[in-house]
Amino acid sequence: MEYTNIAVYIEHLSYLGVFLWFAIIEQFTPIPEEISLMSTGYIAIHTGLNPFLCGAAALAGLLTLDNALFYLSMKGSHFTQKLFDKLNTQLVDRVQEQLKKHAVRTLLITAMIPQLRFFSPVIAALSHIRWKLFFLVNGAATLFYTVVYMLLGIFFHQQLTRLLKKLHLTQHIIFIVLMLIIAVYLIRKAGKLLLKASKAK
């Protein structure tokens, strides 16, 4: 189960584990980033870890990855160029066009759209957006994004605990089911947004 895997990992490696998860490991799993953040909030409360420190570690991991991708793209890395080539051409053209007209707004939006978020640093760098602007805007958007999803995870834990104080196994099963439902919704929603954007041009 996705929740179980993340829970065991975080319990063993604590805050360093959270940082490494979002900076590196999460990118090699099929788990949507939003689900990982909600699970981290839930797990932090359940295991007694400090949710603020968990959130800070998650944010640091995400920003490390984003800025590493931006830097590699700016330097002409073959790895990020391959990532760029995998993207829908019409979608990329659309985003780059919007970056030229409304850089701040476009950076904010792309930093919070599931699936597209991972590629936004690459597109921004190859669109010649200044790193300082990217760092500030993407950082603000990622902070908001992290706080919202972490709080949702904490909220789920608190509500389920109140309802199921003596049924801990059932509580976790319900949380896993909720995460799976949300994951399917986010993936389908992201797919529709990406398809709509590619056809809009």
Image: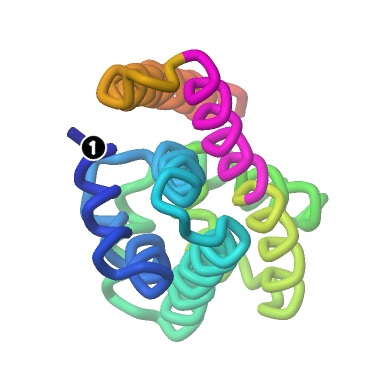
Above or below: residue 181 compared with residue 131: above
Q: Which residue is located at x 42 percent, y 70 percent? A: 15
Residue closer to the observer: 32 or 130:
32
The verdict on residue 74 being magenta is no
Colour pattern: rainbow
Above or below: residue 191 compared with residue 88: above
Locate residue 63 relative to residue 7 in the image: left or right: right
Q: Which residue is located at x 74 percent, y 60 percent? A: 140
Q: Which residue is located at x 47 percent, y 27 percent? A: 190
Residue 12 lies, in percent from the top left, at 24, 65
Residue closer to the observer: 49 or 79:
49
Residue closer to the observer: 154 or 198:
154
Identify the magenta region: 147-163
Looking at the image, can residue 126 be seen? no
What is the quadrant of the C terminus in the image? top right
Q: Residues within 10 Å of mark 1 (few under 14, many from 20)?
A: some
Q: Main secondary structure of the magenta part?
A: helix
